Amino acid sequence: MIEKDRVGYWASRVMASFQKACKENQDSLGISDDQALVLSVLDQEGPLEHSQVEGKLSQFWRLDVVQWETAVGEMMVRGLVDFHDGKLALTELGRSINQQELEGIDLMRHDLCAGLSADEYFLTVSLLKKLARGAEEYLELKDSTSPLDALKAS
């Protein structure tokens, strides 16, 4: 039985809704979630070497090297990304697709947060940041100690 008074339950529902809305937006633009991440990094950071893009995406990336190469290759074929002087960079089309993705996310976030005041939104984000930091610290501690010691420390 699912306990509906748990943070994880509600966080999962929010993430599922947000991911579904993101996927619909990305599908309309003809890009995958992984391609959207690459476009975003290249848009924010400018031309980057292959390894730099991988480094920036390491906290999000779920693909192996072959899938990574395939995703970037598909974006190159579609004219979203170009490779010059050893660096990946967005093309004008890639920049346009990324901008449309960002605009879609902004609209989605606005719609998904309808009914929250600005104060409630910022409080929610603040609490989620604390929960994320606590979870990350727990996992780091767990990785450095035995399972029983990690549970006792938390």
Image (cartoon, rainbow, N blue to C red):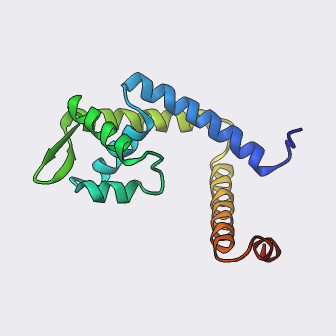
Q: Residue at x 69, y 42 (%)?
A: 12
Residue 101 on image: x %, y %: 39, 35
147 left or right of 143 in image: right
Q: Residue at x 55, y 38 (%)?
A: 109
27 left or right of 123 in image: left
136 left or right of 45 in image: right
Residue 149 on image: x %, y %: 78, 77
Outermost residue toward the top in this view: 28
From the image, which quarter does the N terminus lie in?
A: top right
Residue 122 on image: x %, y %: 62, 54
**Count of labels in the image:** 0
Task: Give the quarter of the image for residue 71.
Answer: top left
- In this view, the residue in front, 126 or 119, is 126
- In this view, the residue in front, 120 or 85, is 85
Q: Residue at x 78, y 72 (%)?
A: 154
Where 149 falls versus 126 (above or below)?
below
Outermost residue toward the right in this view: 1
Residue 82 on image: x %, y %: 17, 41
- In this view, the residue in front, 92 or 122, is 92
Q: Residue at x 18, y 53 (%)?
A: 87
Outermost residue toward the left in this view: 85
132 left or right of 88 in image: right
- In this view, the residue in front, 102 or 140, is 140
